[in-house]
Image (spheres, rainbow, N blue to C red):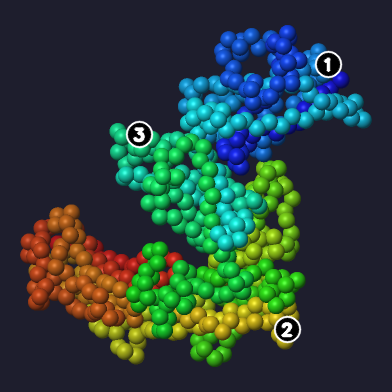
Amino acid sequence: MNYIIKGNLRGLLCSDCELPVAGTSVKVYRPSDLQNETRLAVADPKQTFHQVTGEELKAKERLFITQADVQENGDFTIEIDGAKSGYEGGSIDVDWYCGNVPFKIPLPKNEPLLQFHITTLQPLYKRSPENVQYARFDYKIDSKWFCRILTLLDIWVVCGYVNDCETQKPIPGVKVFAYDVDLLQDDYLGNAYTDNNGKFTIVYPGDNFRKTLLPWLNVEWPAGPDYYFRVESSSGTVLLAEDRTRGRQNDRHNANNCFCVKLCVKGGGIITSDIPWFTSVGNFSITSDIDGSGKTLISKFGAGGTGYGFFGSVKLGGYATKKVPTAPASPLYYRFLFSTDNVNFSPVTTAQMETTALKVATRQITWNGTTAFQDVVIDINQPASVPDSVPADNYPNPIPDHVLHPDVNGWVRVDQPALDNGFYGSLFYLNTTTIIGGGDASAGLTPGLAVPVADQKNGRMLYIQFQTTDDPANPASPNLNTQSLIGKIYVNNWNEVNLLKLEELFAGGGSGCTPISGTAHADYTVDHELIASWSLGVWSNATGTVSGLPSGTTPRGDAKKFDLASPPAPYVLTPPFSAWPSCAYSLTLTTYRKLTTGESNDWGKTNQVIFCK
């Protein structure tokens, strides 16, 4: 006769938080205390749970029957071959073996090998038609025991829930980041997504909060972490950002290794009006961060600044609900329109797309038998997925993207299984160069001479409009909605003029290898409508950096034939040209434009001339 016991093993962290003990084992033995077998079989497992000593473990070895591994969700399956083991369905001792590397967190091998006796169990078997006896045994390790065990293994756990602040409804699919306040440098501890109940669990080793900037100082002061949290939507929008001082308050300060917390997000993590909106270009709100001329007013997350225009590919952000507000049974379609005159608008289609994949949402799926997350992307480089289709569990293969393609008129259908009640964050990746061209502005120009006004390259205003509908094929649909608020950005995709020449290198038909001696003229031209800064530079091993050279932030730039040997007032070079020893030198012209993609600024451009003196 064969016997199968299916069960689930978890550890309690607090009253409403528990942790599956994946990576550990359940071991089964014949009862060691035959005289008290019946009494132990009916005893409360909370009273029988204890750590197995080395002496007990040695005595148990001859009574061992089998063991089973605990899976990701805490499930285990004990299979006993009655013929081989001699087991006939009686009582068994059930132990939990967690060794020294549970929960897939590497620990030093000299940590203790831990085994705990759970209970003496008399399984209530039921016979199946296949002549197999089945029983069930689920167990939750009491929090007092479990947290003490985690302490021995230096494992720390944050378990909590994210709810809507007003309705108290759980918020699924958001990402929670945990941090520890430190004297010198705050520690990042880990992150996790919330499940359908808004629950998240972050497990990490104690070393994560003991990190310091000083290698000889490897202790935490105070002794436990001081928690504060950040919550992001599946598309990366920050929904909650606690101040680090929150970690010093009594309920977060010097926390124990089992820490349970409840966090709340205003508006349920989405725009509470449930009305689709176009709200931003990159990091910048179209209503408050961009001025009437289409330039940024401020710097946000390291991008933009006062008076910055836009260039390259930009992400158009906002909120697209799963359903059409005026037709709640219909999936929502959205698209963007563009114009350069704010009168005639055309759809943004794949012809205006940035070809890099854009993540617009996350879905919750099953992979490897447990909860996992799938990216929803707009990507014309991958075949489009069947709308709303959910992939079959195909572990160990990587989780594929769920791929969306805009149709010929630019309409994107909101994926219905997406979290966040739709797409919340980046909605489309627009390549502005396909609408407002640019390129090399230096053609036909001469270094040292100013750019004629007629040859100066300027940008243009780009107007962006947002539409939603229930039926892309019906332009007359009563559910077609065009957002009245139009986004506008000033776009300049022209490279700056950055021209540099050292006259004497090729003077008189020189080869460019002749050393410079008595005279040296650096001819440079800088021009761009949105120049941020420019600077001329000289460096060598002999002198280091030469100071006193021209630089500036003047509008459009500058152009000069600058005499390095006899610089005009007010320029004073240090060291002077006459004191430069014989060596190789680098002459550079570096320029930066006041342009941003909304997420990062222009990296700058450097033109270099190498010469000898």
The Cα atoms of the two marked residues, 3 and 1, are separated by 54 Å
What is the quadrant of residue 132 in the picture? Answer: top right
Q: Element under label 1?
A: loop
Depth check, mark 2 against mark 3: the one in front is: 3
> x and y percent of residue 593 in the render?
34, 73
Residue 456 relative to residue 5: left or right: left
The Cα atoms of the two marked residues, 2 and 1, are separated by 72 Å
Upstream in the sequence, badge 3 or badge 1?
1
Q: Residue at x 86, y 28 (%)?
A: 126
Task: Report which residue position mark 2 lands on.
Answer: 477
Task: Report which residue position mark 3 lands on.
Answer: 219
Q: Amino acid at mark 1?
A: Glu
Q: Amino acid at mark 3?
A: Val
- Look at the image and tell me whether residue 171 can be seen: no
> x and y percent of residue 35 in the render?
73, 8
* Residue at far right of view: 129
Q: Amino acid at mark 2?
A: Ser
> x and y percent of residue 444 in the render?
34, 82
Upstream in the sequence, badge 2 or badge 3?
3
In the picture, the quarter occupied by the C terminus is: bottom left
Task: Give the numbered dot on residue 88.
Answer: 1
